[in-house]
Image (tube, rainbow, N blue to C red):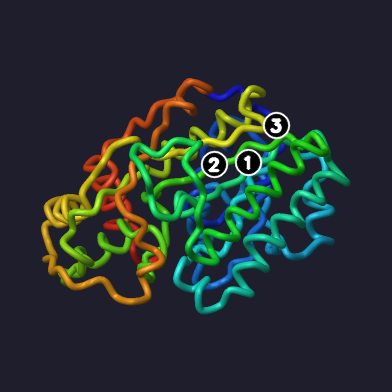
Amino acid sequence: MFGIDGKKILITGGLGMIGSTIARMLVDNGAIVTILDACIEPFGANLFNVDDIKEKVSINFSDIRDKESLKILVRDKDIIFSLAGQVSHNDSISNPHLDADINYIGHLNVLEAVRRYNSEAVVVYSGSRLQFGTVQYNPVDEEHPLNPRTPYALNKTAAENLYKYYHELYGTRCVIFRIANPYGPRGQMKHSKYTIINWFIRQAMANETITVFGDGEQIRDYIYVDDLAEAFILSALTPACHGQIFNIGSGVATRFKDMVEAIIGIVGRGCVKTVPWPDNYINVETGDYITDISKLRGAIPWMPKTDLESGILATYDYYSEFSRYYY
């Protein structure tokens, strides 16, 4: 499918939802995959995510803050998917030093290792739609102003600038993404700090009450993890993408309450209640958000294939079989 047979790939954060999905696609297409993951709780690393391909990948339990480890691991790799990170917006407020250490300094370590020891590698970086801060217009294109409102979004933006800098000064072949709201199989379900759809599916499966902040009319863009992974791989293999920034999502506007109602309908359990926005979400709520994916669609032969209901059903089916490995 990708023409990636025999290529050597490093995935940092490769035991998480996005990284393990990329790993599985790569293995299926003949790539030689190395996974780096620090397995820091509660970020989502899970060995079960690669259980059925564990004999086909190399796993290194290390950390992007470990410069000596990176010095070895980046060598001879054709592509590096730089996905490792602290994933909680609210935790970045309570512990900004940890967020900066991983989400900024960690990525400086990756780039320095690539510059010194493997300058020909392509590096794909995963940023966040929260870098935009309060949304000024929709759909949101790549030219929308960046106004990060949490340390998480701030450090994602600072790291993005690092990748741009290394591309412009050293010629590092970087592809930069700003991701909307990802969800799908192999995402953690222990808490609501990441992959909110996965968390709501868990609550519905337990016949619990799903809490919606505000009136539920807020608009979001949800992208299924397989669609996301495919775009990442294609962009790495497309020279015209190197040095570019892309917004990525489904491009489809969904009201929050409609997403929740879809989950309850598909799972067949659970209920919903609305409550006022809590104070610690003030900086996270940025207004309605829809991704303009026209730049990415013009650069690679890609289109999101999975509509929201199909993605929720596939995610529910996965956890119906394997939930014991996730909580």
Kindly identify which residue carries mark 2: 177
Identified by mark 3, the residue type is: Lys
Q: Is residue 191 above or below residue 14?
A: below
Residue 297 drawn above or below residue 288: above
> Which numbered mark, 1 or 3, is in the foreground of this view?
1
Of residues 132 and 118, which is closer to you in this image?
A: 132
* Label 1, label 3: how far apart the Cα atoms are: 15 Å
Helix or strand or loop: what does disc 3 sit on? loop
Up/down of 228 relative to 106, above or below: above
Tell me which label, 1 or 3, sits earlier in the chain. Answer: 3
Q: Quadrant of the C terminus?
A: bottom left
190 vs 309: above or below: below
Q: Mark number for residue 250?
A: none
Res 190 → quadrant: bottom left
Which amino acid type corresponds to the residue marked 2 in the rendered image? Phe
Residue 193 image point, x, y percent: 40, 67
Residue 253 location, x and y as percent?
26, 41
Q: Is residue 15 visible?
A: yes
- Residue 78 in view here: no
Seen in the image, is 166 located left or right of residue 59?
A: right
* Element marked by disc 1: strand
Residue beneath disc 3: 7
Residue located at (56% from left, 47% from top): 126
The label on residue 124 is 1
Image quadrant assignment for residue 322: bottom left
- Left or right of 119? Residue 41 is left
Whether tag 1 and tag 2 are in contact, CB under 8 A, the answer is: yes
